[in-house]
Amino acid sequence: MSNWWRGMVAGALVSGGVAAFVRRRVTAGTSARTRHRSETLFAYHAARHKILILGAGFGGMAAALRLDEQLGNRGDTSVLVVDRDSALLFTPLLWTVADGRADPNDVVVPIRAFQRGRSFHLLHANVEGIDLDRREVRTSAGIRAYDYLVVALGSVTAVPSLPGLRERALRFHTPADAIELRNHLIDALENAHHTVDARERREWLTFVVGGGGDTGVELAATIRDYLQVGLLAEYPWLVDERPRVVVVGRAQRLVPMSSPTTSSAVERILRDEGVEVWTDVAIEGVTERAIQTSRGTIPARTLFWAAGITAPPVVRDLPVEHARNGAVLVDETLRVPERPEVFVVGDSAWAFDGVSGEPAPPTAQAAGHMGEYVAEAIAGLIAGQQPTPFRFVTRGRLALLGHRTGVAEVFGHAFQGLPAWLLWHGYYLSAIPAWRNRIRLLTSWLLAGLTGRVTAQLRLGSSTGAEEISEAREPSQVAS
C-alpha cells in the first residue's frame, strides 16, 4: 500500500473515530437519563464534593463530560463549569471564516448543548480572582468555593512591548478577528486602488505575519488564498501588482514543534503558493509604513501578530510558579505543586508528559486529552486512589496551507496537497459536535467553491453619532 493511501486510511480512521466519540459524548443517552435541572447556589455549597471548572474550552468541557461519566450518578457531588461566554469556539475553523467561506456562527456551539442529559452545571460569569488559601473563586456572579479546582482558562495572544507593535499589530484569536482580517484586506486593496504613488501601493499590498508557528503559517496561507482566489477577482487591475505575503519566524524552521519533515513540507508549500518565508529573523519594531526586522526593513502597512501566547491575567496573578509565558508550572499529574486539589489544563498549564518528559503542545487536541485525564484523576481521588502520571500521545497534526493544499501527520504517516486539504475539512467537520453546524459549514464551503468567496465587508461596531445626526435632518437635506 502506498504512503498516500496509508495516510488517507489513517486519516479516515482518526476522523471517523473522533466523530463517533464526540457524537456519543454530546448527543447520546439523553432519553435514558434524567433531564438536566438547574442547581441552586445553596445546593452547590451543600455538596460533599464541589468540583469547580474554570473555562468551557476544549480542556474544560472535556473534563466536565468525563466527570459526568465518572461521577454523574453520585448525589453528593456537584460539578460546576464557569465561563464568560455562552458558546465553545472551534478555533481551527476560523480559517474558513477569514477566507470568506463560512459564517462566524458556523464555528461556535452553544455550551448548554453539552449540558443536555448530563449532571454538571454551568455558570455564565467572568472569573475575577482565585484564592488558593481559602479555596474560593471570585466571579462576577459571586464567590464559589471548591474542593477540587480545574483551571482551563486558555490563553491570549502575547504581544511584546516592541516599538509600535502593540499599537499597530493585528491579532487573530476570535471570530471578530476573522471578520476584521477580511475587512482589513479589503481596505488595503481599496487604498492601493486609490493611490497614484507606486511605492505606497506596494506598501498597501504587502502583508507581514509575525510568527512561524502553526497559527502564523496558516494565517499567511489564508491571507494569500483569500487575496488570490477571492478578492483580486474584484480588483482585476491590481492582479499584475502581485500582493506580497511574508511570514517572519524567530525559530530556525517553521512549525518547530513538528517533525523536520513536516516543517520542510510546510515551507515548500508556502513558497510554492507565493508566500515569502523568513526564518531565524526577529521583528524589532513597527511604523506606519514599515516593519523592522533583524534582517532588514519590509515596507508594509500591515502586520498580523501570531508569535506567541500568554496566560490570561487571572492565571498569571496566581501565587505559584509560572513559566515565562505566564502558564502555571504543574507536576506530572497536572497539579500545582503543594496544591493537590488544584489542576491546570490546556494553554494555562506548562505541562510535560509524565513519562517521556516531552512538553504538551498548546493545541485543542492536547487540551482535551488533559481535561479527560484530570477528570479521571479527580474521580480516583474521591475514591481514594492516587493518579498515575499524565501521558500524551498525539493523534497527528493538520495544517491548512492555501487553495486546496495542506500538510498532515497522522499516526506517523505524512502526506500533503489535496488529500491533506480534504482530510483537514473532513476531520474538523466531523469533530464539531452539532449537526446544524456541520450542515451549515458543508453548505457554505460548497457554495464558496461553486459561486465564490464572500468579498463584502462586515463592520461589527455600533452606530455612531453621525448616523443619529443625519436621521434628525429634513428629508430634503438627506436626499442629496
Image (cartoon, rainbow, N blue to C red):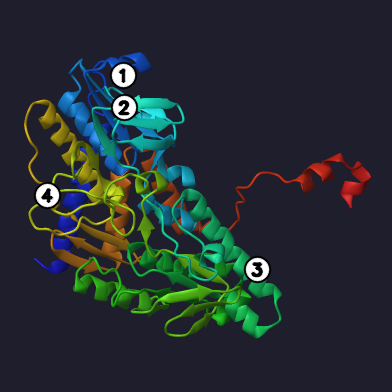
Q: Secondary structure at mark 2?
A: strand
The numbered mark at residue 391 is 4
From the viewer's perspective, is residue 141 above or below residue 221? above
| Amino acid marked by disc 1 | Tyr
Q: Secondary structure at mark 3?
A: helix
Q: Work out how far the residue at label 3 is from the one at label 2, CA to CA, in angstroms.
A: 49 Å
The residue under the point 63% across, 79% down is: 201
* Quarter in which the N terminus is drawn: bottom left
**Residue 68 occupies which quadrant of the picture?**
top left
Q: Return the disc, 3 or 4, that comes first in the chain's sequence.
A: 3
- Residue 380 placed where, x, y %? 10, 31
Q: Is residue 40 visible?
A: no
Q: Work out how far the residue at label 1 is from the one at label 4, CA to CA, in angstroms.
A: 32 Å
- Residue 227 placed where, x, y %? 51, 68
The numbered mark at residue 190 is 3
From the viewer's perspective, is residue 25 above or below residue 162? above
| Amino acid marked by disc 3 | Glu
Q: Secondary structure at mark 1?
A: helix
